[in-house]
Image (cartoon, rainbow, N blue to C red):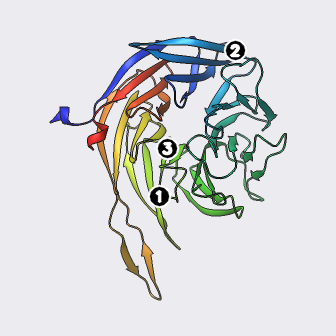
């Protein structure tokens, strides 16, 4: 029976001379990029290419400041420019064929950029190209690479509210040229969703522990599902199809990774109901979300449509590293192919089997 389940297999392992903080698969290629920090505090940017049972280093660059995060989400496919956030608060985009100087550069924040996401480029053809950055200064800023030096939007703490470290950001709901939301997670457990069209707070909640990762199942459709991972061994899957006026979005909470941090979540590009999480115990966990039937709830005055929380099935898990797996990404082109990095200073290419049959 075990062999009928999807299997998570480590295919390639490469040792690194620096600490990796993010990995991204380069769209429409057999290459991936690793971002991190050298022991001397400088930034590492390396590109690897699959070659049979090996991953060969094809280019590398060292920059003055350590890299924390990256995304291809705001770049058109013919460019595939990588946007990065670094420890000095600088946002840059890079042509990976010529990394001597960035294509675009701006001092986005006065403190470290913890998180980044892009929209309007690879995989999302609607709306303008935009990059969201979240920082230790508590703000989320939206940037258009065509506009120099000034963000197109800035989301700051409300008056009187302390600045909370922004740990993760994610675009969603970009199903046409006008609609788009940004979700942000903070160190104190706050999760906030902002409507960028009306520049208003759409929804907020608190999951009681620091929010490590947020991802919508797809960016280019009407909001459907969102997964939020936390510092304390759990994640929440929110059904975004129905929002109750008082109770908000229906959700299911799942404990994971043996009481360690759930560092990241990534949905399978070929099947939005399948996602993988990485843990502080060195595990990868593969899940499938199962939708519930909708039901009606009657209160004293009105009948509201209330989405019922679905269920989450653990398909399989694998122990892939002795240190926390801090970053992972799926290949957008080859189903089941993934790359992940751990704090043991190694990057690994994995293969998840039998995904087409679940």
Q: Separation of disc 1 and disc 2 at Cα?
A: 40 Å
Name the side, left or right, on which 271 lies relative to 62: left
Residue drawn at x 71%, y 46% as measured from the top left: 138
N-term-proximal mark, 2 vs 3: 2
Residue at mark 2: 62
Give the image location of residue 46, x and y in percent: 60, 17
Name the side, left or right, on which 186 lies relative to 332: right
Classify mark 3: residues with Cα within 10 Å, few (<14), some (14-19) or many (20+): many
N-term-proximal mark, 1 vs 3: 1
Q: Which mark is residue 224?
A: 1
The residue tagged with tag 2: helix, strand or loop? strand
Q: Relative to the observer, which residue lies in front, 81 or 141? A: 81
Task: Using the rendered view, name the quadrant where residue 193 is placed.
Answer: bottom right
Residue at mark 3: 230
The residue mark sitting in front, 2 or 3, is: 2
N-term-proximal mark, 1 vs 2: 2
- Is disc 2 in contact with disc 3, using a CB cutoff of under 8 Å? no
Residue drawn at x 47%, y 89% as measured from the top left: 301
Quadrant of image for the C terminus: top left
The residue mark sitting in front, 1 or 3, is: 1
Give the image location of residue 198, x and y in percent: 71, 64
């Amino acid at each position: 029976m075990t062999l009928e389940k999807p299997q998570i297999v480590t295919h390639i392992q490469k040792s690194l001379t620096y600490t990796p903080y993010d990995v991204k698969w380069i769209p429409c290629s057999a290459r991936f990029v690793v971002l991190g920090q050298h022991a001397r505090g400088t930034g590492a940017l390396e590109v690897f290419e699959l070659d049979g049972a090996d991953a060969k280093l094809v280019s590398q660059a060292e920059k003055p400041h350590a890299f924390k995060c990256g995304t291809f989400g705001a770049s058109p496919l013919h460019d595939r420019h990588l946007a990065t956030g670094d420890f000095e608060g600088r946002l840059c985009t890079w042509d990976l064929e010529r990394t001597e100087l960035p294509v675009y550069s701006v001092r986005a924040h006065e403190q470290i950029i913890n998180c980044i996401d892009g929209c309007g480029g690879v995989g999302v053809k609607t709306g303008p190209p935009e990059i969201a950055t979240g920082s230790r200064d508590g703000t989320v800023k939206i940037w258009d690479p065509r506009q120099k030096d000034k963000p197109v939007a800035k989301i700051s703490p409300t008056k009187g509210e302390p600045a909370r470290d922004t740990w993760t950001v994610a675009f969603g709901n970009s199903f046409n040229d006008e609609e788009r939301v940004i979700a942000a997670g903070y160190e104190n457990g706050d999760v906030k969703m902002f409507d960028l069209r009306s520049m208003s707070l759409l929804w907020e909640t608190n999951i009681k522990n620091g929010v490590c990762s947020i991802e919508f199942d797809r960016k280019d459709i009407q909001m459907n599902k969102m997964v939020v991972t936390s510092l304390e061994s759990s994640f929440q899957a929110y059904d975004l199809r129905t929002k109750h006026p008082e109770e908000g979005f229906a959700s299911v909470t799942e404990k994971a990774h043996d009481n360690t941090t759930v560092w990241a979540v990534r949905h399978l590009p070929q099947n939005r109901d399948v996602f993988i999480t990485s843990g502080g115990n060195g595990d990868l966990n593969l899940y499938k979300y199962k939708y519930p039937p909708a039901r009606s709830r009657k209160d004293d005055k009105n009948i509201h449509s209330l989405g019922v929380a679905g269920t989450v099935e653990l398909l399989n898990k694998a122990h892939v590293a002795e240190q926390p797996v801090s970053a992972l990404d799926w290949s957008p082109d080859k189903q089941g192919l993934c790359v992940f990095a751990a704090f043991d200073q190694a990057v690994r290419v994995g293969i998840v089997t039998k995904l087409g049959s679940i």
